Amino acid sequence: MEKAKFFQEQKIGDEEFRKLYERYYRPGLTFLVSIVKSREDAENMLQDVFMKLWLRKEKLAFDTGLQAYIFASLRNIAFDFLKKLEREEQVRKSFFEQMAEGDDVMDETMVSAVSGAVEKLTEKRRMILRLNIEEGKSYQEIAEIMRISKNTVKNQLIKAKQHLKNTLEYPLAIQ
């Protein structure tokens, strides 16, 4: 097991870090996929953890070994990801419950404002937004349907939601 001194050395080259990444790539990926059930998300998380490890290498100290630190970091990022997905699902459900309640929560003016703001989006953003919010499709599913990358879906959805947030004066749960 590696000791903390690995990171305390003054010069850790790219080659040493690459070897470390390669050593933990498969077990880390397997671990993350078992939690988040998505290889692509797991790969992104693994890269994020190793990027943070690299950027903080001079500041890190371990009471346990490096392996325990890496897997604790992977577990934490996976759980944060799952919490975020759960919050997004709750927001989506809340939004549709509000829509179903009708006059009590959302009056015709609000519905009209939302519809108008959505119509001002580009066709691509409008479709991505509808697939995500109305149909509950994941970024990956939308990417496959529209034959674009998952990152494009994510970026377009962020821009669409930002447009709605900036356009609407009502505090909607579309964040």
Image (tube, helix red, strand yellow):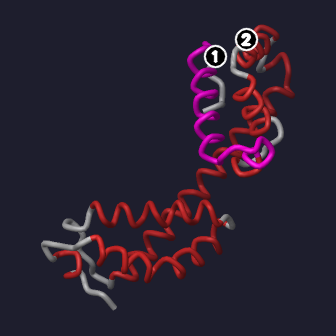
Dot 1 amino acid type: Tyr
**Residue 59's image quarter?**
bottom left
In the shown orientation, is residue 115 left or right of residue 46? right
Q: Residues within 10 Å of mark 1 (few under 14, many from 20)?
A: few
**Residue 1's image quarter?**
bottom left
In the shown orientation, is residue 153 left or right of residue 76? right
Identify which residue, 169 or 37, lies in the foreground. Answer: 37
Vertical side of 40 occupied by 3: above or below: below
Q: Which residue is mark 2?
A: 113
In the rendered structure, are the residues bearing label 1 and label 2 in contact, judged by CB atoms less than 8 Å apart? yes
Vertical side of 167 occupied by 81: above or below: below
Residue 107 in the image, given as x and y percentages of width and height: 80, 13
Q: Which mark is residue 170?
A: 1
Residue 170 in the image, given as x and y percentages of width and height: 64, 16
Q: Residues within 10 Å of mark 2 (few under 14, many from 20)?
A: some
Q: Earlier in the sequence, mark 1 or mark 2?
A: 2
- Look at 33% across and 66% down and name the residue there: 53
The number of numbered discs placed on residues in the rendered structure image is 2
Residue 126 in the image, given as x and y percentages of width and height: 74, 26
Identify which residue, 162 or 10, lies in the foreground. Answer: 10
- Which of label 1 and label 2 is nearer to you? 2
Residue pushed farthest bottom? 1
Vertical side of 140 occupied by 16: above or below: below
The span picked out in magenta is 142-169
